[in-house]
Amino acid sequence: MARAMYTLGGCLLTMVACVGFLALEVPESRGQEEVSNPRVVAEDTSPFPGGYKSVKACRLCHRGQIRELDPDQDKSFVLLNEPAIWLTDPHSKAFAFIDWSDSADPASASPSQQLSREICAKLGISDIHKAQQCLSCHANWVAALDEPPPFYTAGVGCESCHGPSEAWENEHKEPSWRARSVAYKASKGMVDVRHPVQRAEQCFSCHIGNVEQGKHVTHEMFAAGHPPLPSIEIESFAKQMPRHWRYLEEKIADSQKVASPDNADEPPFKFFDAFIRENYLYLKSDGPPPIDHNQSAAAVVLGGVVALREMTELTRDLARPATDGSRAWPELSVFDCTACHHELRPANWRQTRNGEFRPGRPPMHAWPTALVRLAILHISDGREEYDRALDDFNGRLSALRAPFEATPFGDPPTLRKASTEFSQWLTDDLIGPVAAKPFDKLAVRRSRKLLVHIGSTESQDYDSARQIAWALRTLCCDLSGRQEIQDLFDELNNDLRLDLPNTQGEFFQTATPNAQPHKSVIPLTGSVPAALAIEVLYDPAKFMKTMKELQRQFGLMTVRN
Amino acid sequence: MDGHRIRLSWKTLKARATPIVWVGTAICVLVGQPATRADEPRESAAAKVYLLESASGLMAASGTGKFQGARSCAATACHGGIEPDPRFPLSQRNEYSSWLDHDPHARAHRTLSNEKSRIILQRLARANETAEDRDRRLANCFACHNPQPAQDRQAATYYSREGVSCEICHGASEQWIGAHVVADWGVQKKTDRQAWRARTRELGYVDTEDLTIRGKTCAQCHVGSPDREVNHDLIAAGHPVLKFELAAYHELLPKHWRANRERERVAQFETALWSAGQIAAADAALSLLEWRAKPSTTKHPDAAWPELAEYDCFACHHDLEDPSWRRQRTVAGQQLGTSEWGSWYFGPLRQMNDATGEVAQKLTTLTEQMREGFGNDRQKVQQAVAAARTQLDRWSSHESVDVAATMRRALDKLVLDHEQPQTSIRAQPAGWDEAVQLFLAIVAMDRANGAIESNAIDATRELFSFPATYDSPYGFFGQRPPGTLLGGPPTTKQHQKSRQQIVAALVELIQQLKHTGN
């Protein structure tokens, strides 16, 4: 008996020793080491400012190769290959591109690093590693943190979008996490990137700006050499990252691909019903989400409105003096770049276009309003209601524009008030209702029609034209077989550069058939001069013509059908 | 009356009807004729109240006499002759006819009826403005295109559609129209010009023989003055930009006086005219800025602060491109994203180095204020402008200072490579405005002496022309047309006109000037 006890005690001691040994190891120091069973990685007790643990922590488990499907039906819920895809994504190079500190010889630095060095010299930044105004976007060093997060040289990594992971890292490994409510996950710090509005807010926090998080490119930075921020259509940008996620229907399809005859009748993965219920709650349906809810279309339309809201809130926040007195008015980045920055020409299309702009007064950015009518269309039932809703919106937009025109560069208190009211209305009366209504095939078709109508009847500036063309391209995914329409999109791509540059010149195809491949290969280095040149060559009349042709093709389609 | 009929014959009818017809026609012609043509912009009577009340400059200051109208100068025996009269020593006696036939100023009011003006007004009109706003806007247009005195200063003969007519430059004539035909009118001119000028000024007469006064008169409209401006709103709506240089404009103006005699009489006439123009234009620009910086509820509805037209156009109005010459030019420590100010009107003045250099100092203070950016302190700007203007006035009207000579020296320093090469043009003009002003200065200096071949001047003038389809000196800083980056059409000859070329051409012209011992 005593011997058995000794043996048992010995075993227990050994087990405790083993566990204790494992507990001492810090995940960071392991680097790329293999871990046999992910669930046994010990909790790291060292403090993480802000809760950020870095890409390295994620890669301990998310280390699969591209295009791998786990033979286990349940495990195919998550591919675990996201960082591998992310490495082909420019976001992974966001810091590397601007890091000029490593290269001892300036001449050997890449063009973007040289540019970064120039910009820092003019702004008086001596060390790029300490420049929070740059690293807030380029490395997720948000305003709340005193120091950059761990392994910030990875650029824009997992936690930049998904939120700081310390509080939810262990829990999310369990399948039961899928059944948790979105509110619970948010309370742990996980951002709900499935929700089109939340995702848009995350992306736009850098791509448009967010003063609270310290992410903003000032006009001074542009004058120092920072490339101008392009307009962003969220779904096109997300697809071309390339995206490292699958939509719900793709997850279901993939799970069913590896289904064996034994479990073919079971739900595609564990906690399926609860997952649907919790994560698509915003669609206000009592059961599973409607089968033909087009998530891409929803993302396009909601992204369009959220862009306007984020831009409005940026104006509101920048019109407030900073507590350290550093922000003077006017902050010129709030105004439309090309309203001033264009060569003067006789017979200028800017002078002859729609009379809504007051001559001589720099207006706000035009492109965020390009897609809002799609949202108004979506929540309107019939033509009359749409007209009424559009009139109401135009009235509110005029009220927002008024302070921009009353005096050159506006008066900050008036701007703040107008921006606050407008963004509140957008959140309550437009974004909410649009998000709650599913996008079926009819909604997609109606949106397409409205877009070509807008594009073919109203003169657009370059950035607005891009928004319309990007949105159309996404909404026309199902028409990829029709050659005439593809040709028209090729023409639009040539004129507006709808394909974005990427790091490896290759577009990674996800495991699903309806992903959109790149037709052209555009290297990231050296892409800025060409992008700016194309903008200068933009001709509004040609864009309108192409849109009319597209409208005609849509008309023919209906006739044929 | 019984049995007595008047036989109505055609003869009788004609005799009776003719006077009636003539009288009737006369009444119709005199009464029915509208005061304005159908295509002219209509302003209400109240608009005239805004005109000239607060306008600065010589027009408002020219005494209290009434404006008679150009027609009161137009008698054939006075100034309305058909041909220039060589017999009369002072006047050619045909100034009115010459002005009416050849001078664009006589047609200035007609510009407001054309399509372009209509479009400008259309673009400026706002949805919710009052009739008063519209009147004020028109008043601003009329203030240059058809300046009119207030009602109580209009004589009965004054006709309100004359464009820029005699009294607008020469002063309201009520009190001197009689005096100026008397034989002893100009006698004091030769002995004590200043006193004569002061005496005649009280009568309302403007001494336009003096080049600085002439320049100031022109600059009131061609640069601007309080309640009379072309600002950024107007330019954005389609109005041409105002870039005034007296010698160049003067050269182009069909003259209604004996211009050759004037050139003979004044030593180095063109240079003197150039320097007078620099001072006059600078003074007008300062007075305009002073007015702009002062808040007021009575300005025209498109007046604004910050006033973007104060700044160099091309500092903002350029395509965004990479690589950008602007990036090469800015250095660490320089204010980023702000604009040049005062490059057109104050370049040469800044070069001058009078005894104390105070004017240049005050101008530097003002420039710093303006270069703070669009959020600068309006009050501080007002103070700096007032100081600069006072200093300029003091310097230019100081008797012991020979302004023309000083300006000539300044021009020499700028134009001819001297001991201080950093102030010469090889190091200097950074910008387009400076280059153009320098060219005009060289032309003025050459005019006075005829040193440079006209071919060389014409060739250099060609270099300054804007490329086709541009309203800007595109290519001046070495920009390439965007198509070349994407394999488009190659750089055209026009785009090759870079700053280096222009500076080289200017240096060449200067060498020619120098060689003739100028």
Image: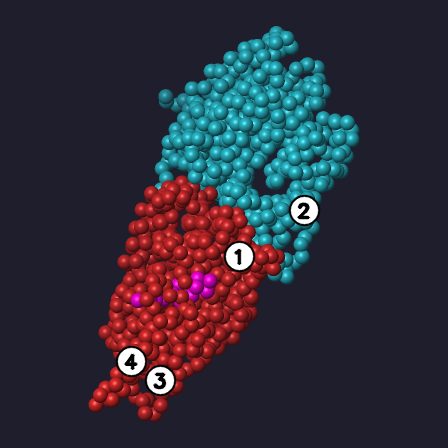
Chain colours: A red, B cyan
Q: Which amino acid type is shown beneath numbered disc 1?
A: Ser
In the image, the segment drawn in magenta is A151-167
Question: Badge 4 sits on which subunit?
Answer: A
**1 vs 4, front mark:** 4
In the image, are marks 1 and 4 on the same chain?
A: yes
Q: Are marks 3 and 4 in contact (CB under 8 Å)?
A: no
Residue A13 is marked as 4
Report which residue position mark 3 lands on.
Answer: A73
Quarter of the image for the N terminus of chain A: give it. bottom left
**Distance between mark 2 and mark 1 Cα atoms:** 39 Å
**Distance between mark 1 and mark 3 Cα atoms:** 47 Å
Question: Badge 2 sits on which subunit?
Answer: B
Q: Are marks 2 and 3 in contact (CB under 8 Å)?
A: no
**Distance between mark 1 and mark 4 Cα atoms:** 50 Å
Identity of the residue drawn at 57% across and 20% down = B395
Q: Rate crowding at label 2 as few (under 14), some (14 to 19) or many (20 or more) other CA atoms within 10 Å.
A: many
**Distance between mark 2 and mark 3 Cα atoms:** 69 Å
Image vertical order of residue B122 relative to residue A558, above or below? above
Q: Are marks 1 and 3 in contact (CB under 8 Å)?
A: no
Furthest residue toward left = A1
Ranked by sequence position, the earlier of labels 1 and 4 is 4
Secondary structure at badge 2 equals: loop
Residue A101 is marked as 1
**2 vs 1, front mark:** 1
Secondary structure at badge 3 equals: loop
Report which residue position mark 2 lands on.
Answer: B497
Residue B201 x, y percent position in the rendering: 53, 14
**Which quadrant holds residue B266?**
top right
Question: Badge 1 sits on which subunit?
Answer: A
Identity of the residue drawn at 65% across and 17% down = B91
Q: As rendered, which of A180 and B185 lies closer to the eye? A: A180
Ranked by sequence position, the earlier of labels 1 and 3 is 3
